[in-house]
Amino acid sequence: MVRFALTVVRHGETRYNREKIIQGQGIDEPLSETGFRQAAAAGEFLSNVKFTHVFSSDLMRTKQTTAGILEKSRFCKEATVKYDTRLRERKYGIAEGKPLCELKALAKAAGEQCPYFTPPEGETLDQVKLRSKEFFEFLCQLILDETSEKGQPTSGTIDSGLETFLTENISVRSNCEPDINSDSVAQVLDANILVVSHGAYMKNMFTYFVVDLECTLPANLSKSELNSVSPNTGISHFIINVEPGAKEIRTTIKCICINLQDHLAKMTESA
């Protein structure tokens, strides 16, 4: 068995986020000034965590956010970032570049609720789920293969700094694991992975974790918090156990926190 940590961060704010315009995949908007500050704040917040792997969507807003996070790192400034198209935002077809209100109007005209509506030329939720499933299975197999090649005993040998980080930064709150200890966060891991992606994609990925993989959630996490879209540079942490099987790998997932935004409050306080 191997054990790894997965930290998922949404990109920083863009002008289109602020103006509530749909970006999807076709609008490759850079971060706004606020977005760059958010990325730096997230990087400062995560600066003592030692990431062994870094993945990002290949769109500009995620690339810039990833660079902003790594710039503040004590250990990962020179980390190689792997850009993966499977981490791209949901494709919204003809709605891209248009105000959110127009997407809602299209959904209403079709007699559907906006989050579940697929605009013409857009991706269905099942298609986004397939992308997130393929990427997650790729991560699990990658860590299994790397651990096997190194001949390391499982579970791991990497002091990630994650337990210390979570213990110091997570107090009891509604959307986080209230008891951070060695049972809930590994002191050593086979890998510690950072992923930077997008709001709708992340929401879909987390739903896949909970519904399909039966992810264990913090006891006080409300349904509304689970179903909400992450704020810009919102941070979510998971601990994943992976066990190879004869036909398929078996995974268990524990959510430590979801859509954490403490670093944004600190950014406001310092402004």
Image: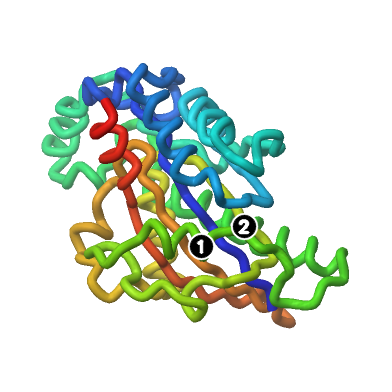
Q: Quadrant for residue 11, please give it.
A: top left
User: How many labels, in total?
Assistant: 2
Q: What residue sits right under mark 1 in the picture?
A: 164
Q: Is residue 28 above or below residue 189?
A: above
Can residue 267 be seen at all in this image of the molecule? Answer: yes
Q: Residues within 10 Å of mark 2 (few under 14, many from 20)?
A: many
Secondary structure of the residue carrying numbered label 1 = helix
Nearest the viewer among 19 and 168 is: 168
Q: Quadrant for residue 160, please give it.
A: bottom right
Q: Quadrant for residue 174, please give it.
A: bottom left
Q: Left or right: where does residue 226 sit relative to residue 121?
A: left
Can residue 121 be seen at all in this image of the molecule? Answer: no
Q: Position of residue 117 (x, y in %)?
A: 25, 43
Residue visible at 51% across and 77% down? 182
Nearest the viewer among 181 and 1 is: 181
Secondary structure of the residue carrying numbered label 2 = strand
Q: Left or right: where does residue 15 sit relative to residue 84?
A: left
Nearest the viewer among 81 and 227 is: 81
Residue visible at 60% across and 53% down? 193
Tell me the kind of residue under disc 2: Asn
Contact check, label 1 and label 2, Cβ < 8 Å? no
Q: What residue sits right under mark 2 in the picture?
A: 192
Quadrant containing the N terminus is bottom right
Question: Which is nearer the N-term, disc 1 or disc 2?
Answer: 1
* Separation (CA) of disc 1 from disc 2: 14 Å
Q: Position of residue 180 (x, y in %)?
A: 41, 72
Q: Is residue 145 above or below residue 93?
A: below
Tell me the kind of residue under disc 1: Thr
